[in-house]
Image: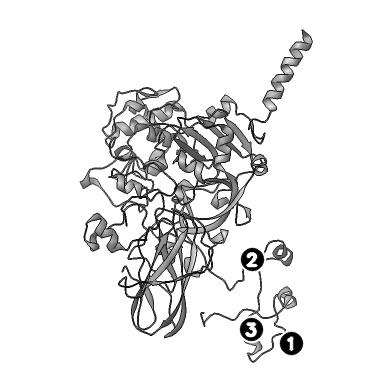
Amino acid sequence: MVSLRFFAAFIGICQLALPQSPTYRVGRAPTPAEIGAWDIAISPTGKELPNGRGTAKEGAALYVRKACAGCHGPLGSGAHAPTLVARKKEERTAPAVPCLSPCVNDTNTMVVHSPFATVIWDYINRGMPLGREGSLTPNEVYALTAFLLYKGDVIKESEVMDAQSLPKVIMPNREGFSLPPEWKHGQPRLQGYP
Amino acid sequence: MDSKKPNPPKTGRRGFLKGGAALAGLAAGARPVEAQTQGTSTKKIDELIAYGERSRFVTSTRKPVAERHSPDEFGLTFHVLTPLQDSFGIITPSSLHYTATHRGAIVPDIDPNEHRLMIHGMVDRPLVFTMEELKRLPYVSRVHFIECQGNSARASHKNVQETHGLTSCAEWTGVPLSLLLKEAGVHADASWIVAEGAEEVKGASSIALGKAMDDCVVCYAMNGEPIRPQQGFPLRLMVPGFEGIYQIKYLRRIKVVDRYYMTYDDYGHINPDPKVTALTHQIGPKSVITFPSAGQQLSGPGFYEITGLAWSGAGAIRGVEISFDGGQSWKNTELRSPAYPMAHTRFGYHWNWDGKECMLMSRCTDDLGTVQPTRADVAKYWNVPLDKVRVQGSNNSVQPWKVAVNGSVTNGLA
């Protein structure tokens, strides 16, 4: 029995170390933990969203505590970093930083332009805060996303954002995009375009 | 070319080593010794033997896009333009290759021994590769341009670096993405991939699976050496002919999925009009004359070799024509380089300038027979007046250069 157990363990070790690619026998299978740590691109369906929850109220406090206001302005506008909260026409000042594509200004904040709320969650999670990217917990990202959605008049202040509710939020620009056409080798970009 | 610049040093290695006094014996010729400028490099000779540098008389440099300084107040790099006016042939030196980043980024300092590429999602066998493993696999070397979608000429631009400097071309080496995806075993119902980088903002784009299986390459080398950090060291995804944002730097993950993921980089490029979206991803046939171009000066009537670059996201360049009368009539040029698919291609034309004012233009035709449009062609397509036309998607319209009687060359859009 001892030898059988030893044999089983030996097979286990071999499987871990065995090359996985069938033709060239290189590479290895990632562990579920390795995949989980890197699987951060969030589908519009919200498939990859982690457990957690947050509200606009919690997000408002985090917006100050995490120093978001330092770059984006206390009201989410008028500072060096892109505008987060669109202002009314009469309140707008010239942007501190000129716009390059993708241009983010009052007419084009993430809340105004994103067809899906998952885009906002994804970007805060991967890209913020500047210099400490990836440091926010899922709860914090849910709360900050809820705060921006509330400031953009998309959800109520009391609404809880989590893996179930966030993908269901209907964004103002939900229909404002078209998918790229199916790509085929040797096919012009747009038939009939000069 | 520039008579104000000193002549290059004519002394041999010894004078160079001493780095100072001109040796009268070597400096033969009519010119007085004082006029011979002697080279002094700031580097030691053993450093220069180990890793060469260009002459100090060659001063061509990249420049940030004027509207957005790089680095900006956060220390981030945005868009940096290649000096196309000084280019020869089709290869952009790696140090002059244009640079653009997702939201602005700090170039990461990645240890290649620690770097991994993960392929997962809708595959039979998720896989992780080390750099050493990737380099054991069959590889290809291909010459490809990369162009930013923001590479769009404006009337305010003063030279070809400003109008067209967000395109560059290099030789890229790596493993075909299709090979890696086949090793992982892509599910029949998969339709897209999400490719993602390892830099601090983890730039990611959605790419159609058809394109991923066709000609994309997971590259570790550029112009015969490991890819430089500003270009994605140690691994960059080459998506030939697609706009720059798809060429994911610091590539660490490819997830095979069944829908368009609308990443941050994707969402910045969406448009409600499917026609505009169709013109946004792949670069159309495009060309530009690099000499004579705005900011340059002809010294008088006589012979000049007109030269420029042409490229297309759909394939190789079949031919390039030029016009001297603002597009009324066109003449064929000669291709002066190999015409690789999705690569800068050099064209040339023998020209005897008669000293009269003219409007120079070039237009190319690609493998598919698609002809680069003038702004008038674009206005006609969208049915808008010429003075109101905005070229939708990636701007591949014809660039006019105005040659004045005094030989000065300016932007014909102005």
Return the mark for residue B53: 2
Q: Mark 2 falls within which chain?
A: B
Whether B113 is drawn above or below A1: the answer is: below
Q: Is label 2 in a helix, a strand or a loop?
A: loop
Residue B414, located in which quarter of the rendered image?
Answer: bottom left
Quarter of the N terminus of chain A within the rendering:
top right
Above or below, comparing residue B275 to residue B378 in the picture: above
Q: Chain of mark 3?
A: B
Q: Tell me the amino acid under the disc marked 2.
A: Glu
Quickly name the residue at label 3. B36
Q: Mark 3 and mark 2 in contact (Cβ < 8 Å)?
A: no
Q: How many marks?
A: 3
The residue closer to the viewer here, B101 or B176, is: B176
Amino acid under label 3?
A: Gln
Q: Which residue is mark 1?
A: B25
- Any mark on residue A113, and which? none
> Mark 2 or 3 closer to N-term?
3
Mark 1 Cα-neighbour bin, 10 Å: few <14, some 14–19, many ≥20: few
Image point (33%, 70%), residue name: B412
Tag 2: Cα neighbours inside 10 Å, few (<14), some, or many (≥20)? few
Task: Estimate how packed mark 3 is, as few (under 14), some (14 to 19) or many (20 or more) residues with alpha carbons within 10 Å.
Answer: some
Task: Give coordinates of residue B122: x percent, y percent.
Answer: 50, 29
Look at 28% across and 36% down and name the residue there.
Answer: A175
The residue lying furthest to the top in this view is A1
In the figure, is residue B196 to the left or right of A96?
A: right
- The answer to whether any part of residue B146 appears in the image is yes
Quick one: which residue is furthest to the right in this view? Answer: A3
Query: If the image is split into quadrants, where does the C terminus of chain A sit?
Result: bottom left
